Structures are given as structure tokens and as C-alpha cells.
Image (spheres, coloured by chain):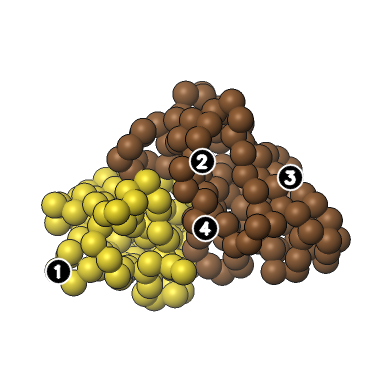
Amino acid sequence: GAGVSQSPRYKVAKRGQDVALRCDPISGHVSLFWYQQALGQGPEFLTYFQNEAQLDKSGLPSDRFFAERPEGSVSTLKIQRTQQEDSAVYLCASSLARIRQNEQFFGPGTRLTVL
Amino acid sequence: SQQGEEDPQALSIQEGENATMNCSYKTSINNLQWYRQNSGRGLVHLILIRSNEREKHSGRLRVTLDTSKKSSSLLITASRAADTASYFCATDAMDSSYKLIFGSGTRLLVRP
């Protein structure tokens, strides 16, 4: 079956623009995660959904970052008034597990460049 | 902030040689995972080892875990050019087991 998909794969934004990044998880996966990966670094946790409920948003860098998963499937990560420091690869992952941590399946990521 | 440090940061070997990467972490964990990331692609899960396990094998991969030293190693035997990638260890925290905390990665180059 299909894996996790993300769109767009690449996004160039001018500083101050709003952007929306989409994630389609594997069908039936309860858990969905967003990570931010800076160049040359490992991914860093942003936020976690269990179905439509956002259970942890402790990793979101500022109130300019907002994520939603209204129907418990597709998720959108929105960044308002983008800044240059927001430039990174944004990775989405999904997992079948409800409670205990399980293998996470990652999408290809969206590379955001803020000019 | 990142949980772990990986060593070495970069590794270059000849095809056929073995590659060993190490990972250290800071807090108590439920399990530790290794992921591979090829240039321009997403992360691919390689292997998971639980905190009560000491060693695990999967094909050409061998993972060890020493919870007393808070460290793990990944051994890739008989490396191939296709193994060229970045390798990351990832841990969960016992108080938030859903969250993966990644190390900074080892960039492996396997020369044909």
C-alpha cells in the first residue's frame, strides 16, 4: 500500500508569507507526528496527534506554527509570517500504535526555504 | 534539543568493509531505534531494540544496547555502495513514549 505522502515536496516562500504543508498518513494509522529537520541535524519533534486530538504540541517553536488534523487523517502544518530560521525540512510520520511508541513511518518531507 | 550524540559524525569506508556507528543518549528509555536517510528521501526504519534487550540482528545489521552506559551501536557488515546514507538513532522517553528523540546522525559513505 501507499506510504506517507507529503506535499509540496519543495516550497520557497518570501519572509512574512504564510505557508501550509500537507501530510497524508498511511490509512488506518492512529498516530501522526510532525518533525523539523535543520540541515545536517537529526529531526526534532514538533507535535503529535492521536486521531484528531493534538495531544502534544510542546515542540512547536513559536505561536506562528499551527497544526491540525480535523478528521483524524490528513494533517496540515501551517506557518504564519515565515522567518528565515523556519527554513528546514518538515517531516511527517504516522504510526499504528495508540499508546506505546511503535515504529514510525516517515514521508519524504517538505523542504521549506524562506528567502 | 536533541537527545543523543552520534559518533563518528562522518565515516568513509570501502565496499565490503564493516561500518560501526555509536549513539549515546541522556535519559531512561523504553526502546531505541535506528533509521536511515538517503539524500533527498525520508527516514526509513531499520531496527528497534527494547530496553531489556542487549543485542539484536536483522540481515547485515547488528545493534547493541547498553542501558547502564546509555549507549548503542549499529554495525553494518559487508557494506555496499547502496548503504551510503545518514544513520540516526532515536529514543523515546519513558514519560512520553510516543515521541522520538533523534541523535545528530552519522553520515556514511561507502566507496565502490
Name the residue rendered at 54%, 28% in the picture. Answer: A72
Query: Which residue position is annotated with label 3?
Result: A20
Secondary element at image label 4: loop
- Please name which of the two marks, 2 or 3, marks the residue nearer to the observer: 2
Q: Which mark is residue A54?
A: 2
Find chain A in the image and tell me its colour: brown
Rendered position, A64 above or below A34: below
Question: Element under label 1?
Answer: loop
Give the distance between the C-alpha atoms of the residues marked 4 and 3, in whole angstroms: 18 Å
What residue is shown at x 36% (from left), y 34% (from top)? A97
Q: Secondary structure at mark 2?
A: strand
Mark 4 vs mark 1: in front: 4
Specify which label sits upstream in the sequence, 4 or 3.
Answer: 3
Q: For mark 4, what is the residue? A: A59
**What residue did someone put label 1 on?**
B68
The kind of residue tagged 3 is Ala
Vertical relation: A8 (above or below) B105:
above
Looking at the rendered structure, whether the residues under marks 2 and 4 are on a common chain is answered as yes
Give the camera-side residue of A71 and B26: A71
Q: Residues within 10 Å of mark 4 (few under 14, many from 20)?
A: some
x, y percent for residue A7: 70, 40
In the rendered image of this protein, which colour is used for chain B? yellow
Q: Residue A64: where, in percent of width, then height?
A: 69, 57
- The answer to whether marks 4 and 1 mark residues whose Cβ atoms lie closer than 8 Å is no
> Relative to A47, is A83 on the left or the right?
right
